[in-house]
Image (spheres, helix red, strand yellow):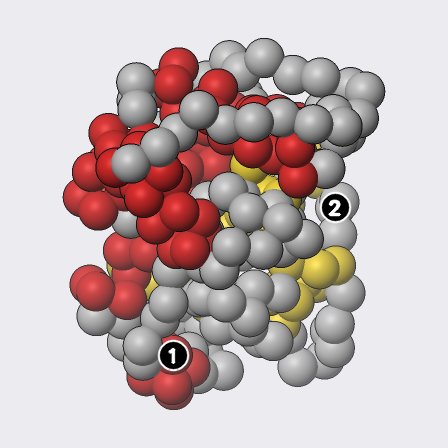
Amino acid sequence: MKFQSILTKSLAAAALTATGLVALNSQNTNDAQAATIVQNDTNVVTINNANSTVAVWDGVENAHFTGKELVHGTTWKVIRTAYDAMGNKWYDLGANQWIMAKYTVEGGNAATAKVATATTAQAPVQQAQAPAQQAQASVQKQTTQVAQKTQTTTSYTSNASGSEAAAKAWIAGRESGGSYSARNGQYIGKYQLSASYLGGDYSAANQERVADNYVKSRYGSWTGAQKFWQTNGWY
């Protein structure tokens, strides 16, 4: 779940020059090998995440954030593709530097696409936290079981009130600005729920119902979810 603001995107953009990213050691090579590897899936991708920069990880399974970020509109050459245990698609940019495919679109100018092998400046830690947490949240949410519904939900009344309602509105504001139609990759609507949770029903009523169920099962309350969000930048 996303939409954290990056206050100094220009610094990250300036740092990502045509030389690419720092080559990392292969400490997570086994993690990548444990994933499902697809060779030559695509050759070039373009970063497509105008709301934030995209975190670079040192592997696929049990990976760590490298401190590097890619900015919207930049184009990168892809070495190989992998799918993690939760079905998330990843691209290897070289030297075990991976990004989540959901923040990209396939294609771009292959002649000017960057190769992730050389040195670039590291973005400030404050900038790096939000993209890292976004990718971390993607994996975490896939492990939480939430009841789903395939038919359209015509009505639903949330029982959140008082501090619970306030916490719920606070999270919605951070996630989507309160918009039921907001989308960011696989995340949908007011609470930026995974599309798989919503079961094809993106109605406002179903978003409210699934969000309440998700928060109850994971945090016990919306105030608990808010506290977690304030500490970690996602829920």
Q: How many marks?
A: 2
Name the residue rendered at 69%, 27% in the picture.
155
Q: Position of residue 99 (x, y in %)?
A: 50, 51
Q: Is residue 199 rendered to the left or right of residue 220?
A: right
Residue 27 visible in the snapshot = no
Name the residue rendered at 65%, 33% in the picture.
205
Please tell me whether mark 2 sits on a helix, a strand or a loop.
loop
Residue 17, located in which quarter of the rendered image? bottom left
Instruction: Identify residue type, mark 2.
Output: Asn
For residue 116, above or below residue 87: below
Disc 1 marks which residue? 9
Q: Position of residue 173 (x, y in %)?
A: 42, 55
Q: Position of residue 84 (x, y in %)?
A: 54, 28
Name the residue rendered at 32%, 44% in the picture.
166
| Label 1 or label 2, whichever comes before in sequence order | 1
Residue closer to the observer: 60 or 145: 145
Placement of the C terminus among the 4 image quadrants: top left
Residue 74, located in which quarter of the rendered image? bottom right
Residue 40, disc:
2
Name the residue rendered at 63%, 49% in the picture.
180
Q: Position of residue 109 (x, y in %)?
A: 74, 77
Q: Is residue 85 rendered to the left or right of residue 219?
A: right
For residue 166, above or below residue 53: above
Please tell me whether mark 1 sits on a helix, a strand or a loop.
helix
Residue closer to the observer: 185 or 28: 185
Residue 195, located in which quarter of the rendered image? top right
For residue 43, above or below residue 92: below
Bin the neighbour count of mark 2 within 10 Å (Cα to Cα): few under 14, some 14-19, many 20 and up.
few
Measure the alpha-carbon separation of dots 1 and 2.
31 Å
Bin the neighbour count of mark 1 within 10 Å (Cα to Cα): few under 14, some 14-19, many 20 and up.
some
Instruction: Identify residue type, mark 1.
Output: Lys
